[in-house]
Image (spheres, rainbow, N blue to C red):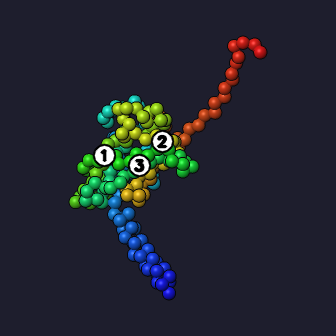
């Protein structure tokens, strides 16, 4: 009898905790804004790999950098985690607790809402570029065809696909690949 009442108690606790966790998870939202001010829509747009050398601050060389903007929180959102994954789902890189500042909200957010934004984040194609000292705190290694995931307090808020740079030269190209063939020649006989 005691075992059954403990099971019922656990079931009821789980039922009451689930709506609370769902309500907390849906109150906050995350948005991405390109360096040129364009707001990205997760299902239609993508974030792009940076093709430029980074500087300590956002400049004309960081045209592919994106700011993540968080709304639905009275103060800075807790435990932010931004990560990138390969197309297969394997984790590539993580940026935990990026610095936030008060920021303007996206157009579709209520005027009374307060929003917080990260510094412009760069997605880099390799670890060497990611670890460049001037931009290490705002860089993530990523892969074409992969995903940029945004979580707050362990709850996923947004996901953006990683695609080609935002320029006319790359329009319509989802992912590029190349086949490399090497021929090694010996300098000495034998």
Q: Nearer the viewer, residue 27 or 59?
A: 27
Mark carried by residue 99: 1
Q: Position of residue 139 (x, y in %)?
A: 40, 39
Spatial distance from mark 1 to mark 3, Cα to Cα?
A: 12 Å
Badge 2 crowding class, 10 Å Cα cut-off, few under 14, some 14 to 19, many 20 or more, is many
Q: Are marks 3 and 2 in contact (CB under 8 Å)?
A: no
Residue at 42%, 71% in the rendered image: 18
Q: Name the residue under label 3.
A: 82
Residue at 35%, 54% in the rendered image: 79
Q: Position of residue 174 (x, y in %)?
A: 53, 43
Mark carried by residue 142: 2
Q: Vertical placement of 145 versus 56: above or below?
A: below
Q: Do the residues labelled 2 and 1 touch (CB within 8 Å)?
A: no
Spatial distance from mark 2 to mark 1, Cα to Cα?
A: 20 Å
- Residue 122 visible: no
Q: What kind of element bears circle 3?
A: strand
Q: Nearer the viewer, residue 2 or 29?
A: 2
Query: Which dot, 2 or 1, sits closer to the camera?
Result: 1
Spatial distance from mark 3 to mark 2, Cα to Cα?
A: 11 Å
Q: What kind of element bears circle 1?
A: loop
Judge from the rendering whether residue 34 lies leftward or rightward of residue 125; answer left or right.
Answer: left
Nearer the N terminus, badge 1 or badge 3? 3
Nearer the N terminus, badge 3 or badge 2? 3
Q: Are marks 1 and 3 in contact (CB under 8 Å)?
A: no
Nearer the N terminus, badge 2 or badge 1? 1
Q: Vertical placement of 175 versus 152: above or below?
A: above
């Amino acid at each position: 009898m005691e075992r059954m009442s403990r099971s019922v108690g656990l079931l009821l606790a789980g039922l009451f905790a689930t709506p609370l966790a769902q309500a907390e998870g849906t109150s906050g939202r995350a948005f991405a804004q390109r360096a040129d001010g364009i707001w990205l829509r997760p299902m239609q747009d993508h974030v792009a790999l940076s093709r430029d050398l980074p500087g300590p601050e956002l400049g004309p060389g960081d045209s592919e950098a994106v700011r993540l903007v968080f709304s639905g929180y009275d103060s800075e959102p807790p435990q932010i985690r931004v990560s990138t994954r390969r197309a297969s789902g394997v984790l590539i890189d993580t940026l935990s607790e990026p610095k936030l500042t008060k920021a303007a909200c996206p157009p579709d957010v209520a005027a009374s809402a307060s929003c917080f934004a990260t510094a412009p984040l760069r997605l880099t194609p390799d670890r060497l570029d990611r670890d460049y000292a001037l931009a290490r705190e705002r860089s993530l290694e990523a892969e074409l065809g992969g995903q940029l995931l945004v979580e707050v307090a362990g709850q996923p808020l947004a996901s953006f696909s990683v695609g080609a740079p935002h320029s006319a030269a790359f329009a319509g190209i989802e992912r590029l690949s190349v086949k490399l063939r090497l021929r090694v020649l010996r300098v000495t006989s034998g």
